[in-house]
Image (cartoon, rainbow, N blue to C red):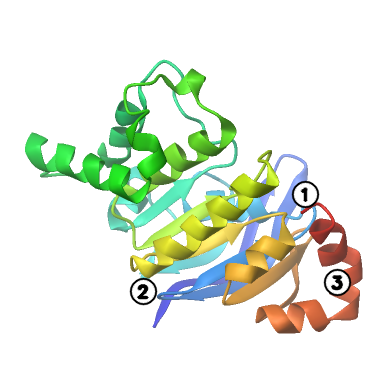
Amino acid sequence: MKLLEINALTARYNAGDVLKGLDIEVSEGEIVALLGSNGAGKSTLLRCISGLVANVSGSIKFAGQELLGRKPESIVRMGVAHVPEGRRIFPGLTVRENIALGASNRRGVDRRGFAREVDEMFAFFPELKRLEHALGWKLSGGQLQMVAVARGLMAKPKLLLLDEPSLGLAPLIVQQVFRIVADIRARGVTVLLVEQNANMALSVADRGYVLETGSLLVSGPPSNLWNNAQVREAYLGGLAAAV
């Protein structure tokens, strides 16, 4: 079943078109990777899906319903959660408080159920349990990323948008983060992943799209992308070297 269908999507900032007629789809239960160099439009695409870009045309359908024109909070309630680049954790709040904020847009959750759901996140991210009362500014990069993902999962999404989850992390922590990505899919959550680390992204993805200056260059399963000489040399080779 197609969970996300994007057709002829164009996004414009003051400097001009950032996305130029993109067609992308994500089926329920997939991990789909968006690859490409800096400035290719990957993060902008996620922001369009989340309703954070104003000047957009085309179509973005989630579970058959059009997202364009909806407010971000409405899109979250429909089942789309966005973990942005840079984590954006509140440094003066505790780990528990930061995670709990992910459910702030949900309705009808009582206090006891709310606390139980946060505890479920600590079970999923056991490293965070001992840090539940630590303030955000005291966390390492990997711990911040776990908090950001846990906060996104508190929204109970059907689709999780992950923007550069490995950015700035040590190689061992990167491997841990991508094991978590695979575990998220095992929980029944579909994942659309923006990532510069091509090796790791394609190791967990079912399919990938390579963007070039706002346009789709090529798409397909990981084996097809790695076997495409032009894509490997121009995009994936350089990205993989950063692993």
Whether the residues at callouts 3 and 1 have beta carbons within 8 Å, the answer is no
In this picture, is 115 found above or below 179? above
Instruction: Give residue 25's position: percent from left, percent from top.
Output: 53, 75
Q: CA distance from mark 2 to mark 1?
A: 29 Å
Instruction: Give residue 157's position: percent from left, percent from top.
Output: 33, 57
**Neighbours of disc 2 within 10 Å: few (<14), some (14-19), many (20+):** few
Q: Quadrant of the C terminus?
A: bottom right
Q: Which residue is mark 1?
A: 39
SS assignment at label 2 = loop
Tell me what residue is drawn at x 38 percent, y 46 percent. 125
Q: Earlier in the sequence, mark 3 or mark 1?
A: 1
**Neighbours of disc 1 within 10 Å: few (<14), some (14-19), many (20+):** few
Name the amino acid type tagged 2.
Gly
Q: Which residue is mark 3?
A: 232
Q: Nearer the viewer, residue 53 or 165?
A: 165
Q: Quadrant of the N terminus?
A: bottom left
Tell me what residue is drawn at x 38 percent, y 69 percent. 186
SS assignment at label 1 = loop
| One can see residue 71 in this view | no
Name the amino acid type tagged 3.
Arg
Of badges 3 and 1, the one in the foreground is 3
In this picture, is 186 found above or below 100? below
| One can see residue 29 in this view | yes
Q: Earlier in the sequence, mark 3 or mark 2?
A: 2
Q: Which residue is mark 2?
A: 64
SS assignment at label 3 = helix
Q: Earlier in the sequence, mark 2 or mark 1?
A: 1
Of badges 3 and 2, the one in the foreground is 3
Q: Is residue 109 left or right of residue 97?
A: left
Q: CA distance from mark 3 to mark 2?
A: 34 Å
Name the amino acid type tagged 1.
Gly
Disc assigned to residue 12: none
